[in-house]
Amino acid sequence: MNEEKTIEVLNTLIEINNDRIAGYETAYNETEELDLKTLFRGFKETSEKCNVELNREVIKLGGVPTEGTKTTGKLFRVWMDIKSALTGKDRKAILNSCEFGEDMALDTYKKVLSDNLDDITADQQTMLNAQYALLKAGHDSVKSLRDALIAK
């Protein structure tokens, strides 16, 4: 196993969690609805916990955890800000934006878990599967709330 590649893979997941943290900070600030604020704060906390685990692994390998976000995450936050401003903080628009971000996060985890198994240990794979399950639950919550609005 190439430790530099492992660090790179783990840092990719740190970046996507950083994007998620920043995205949910934006979503939290863009809504005045208490249920969404509670949901978004919980999602942010989930990614913060994931990052603690990921940072620990990177440091254990002698690497430096990334502190940045992906460019696509920055674009997502800008897009969410613009869309929210245009729609007057519309619940459906905010949930659509959040689901888009959740899809990106899940896709990143799926890619690592399918394409990089040779670059991570069995313990890291277990950790990433558990994190994926947490993010998937968040995605499904957002999708369910959004779908309930569409059904009305």
Image (cartoon, rainbow, N blue to C red):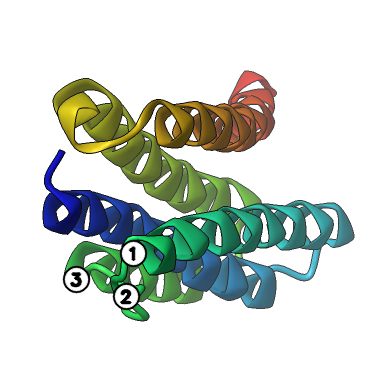
Q: Quadrant of the C terminus?
A: top right
**Lower sequence index among marks 1 and 3:** 1
Who's the residue at 38% across and 71% down the image? 77
Q: Nearer the viewer, mark 1 or mark 2?
A: 2
Name the amino acid type tagged 1.
Glu
Who's the residue at 31% across and 70% down the image? 62
Q: Residues within 10 Å of mark 1 (few under 14, many from 20)?
A: many
Any mark on residue 55, and which?
Answer: none
In the image, residue 14 lies at what x, y percent?
39, 61
Who's the residue at 22% across and 21% down the image? 114
Q: Nearer the viewer, mark 3 or mark 2?
A: 2
Q: Is residue 114 above or below residue 83?
A: above
The reply, left or right, for residue 71 in relation to residue 130 is left
> Which image quarter: residue 141?
top right
Any mark on residue 71, and which?
Answer: 3
The answer, for residue 83, to whether it is visible in the render is: no
Q: Are marks 1 and 2 in contact (CB under 8 Å)?
A: yes
* Residue identified by numbered label 1: 15
Name the amino acid type tagged 3.
Thr
The reply, left or right, for residue 126 in relation to residue 13 is right
* Residue identified by numbered label 2: 66
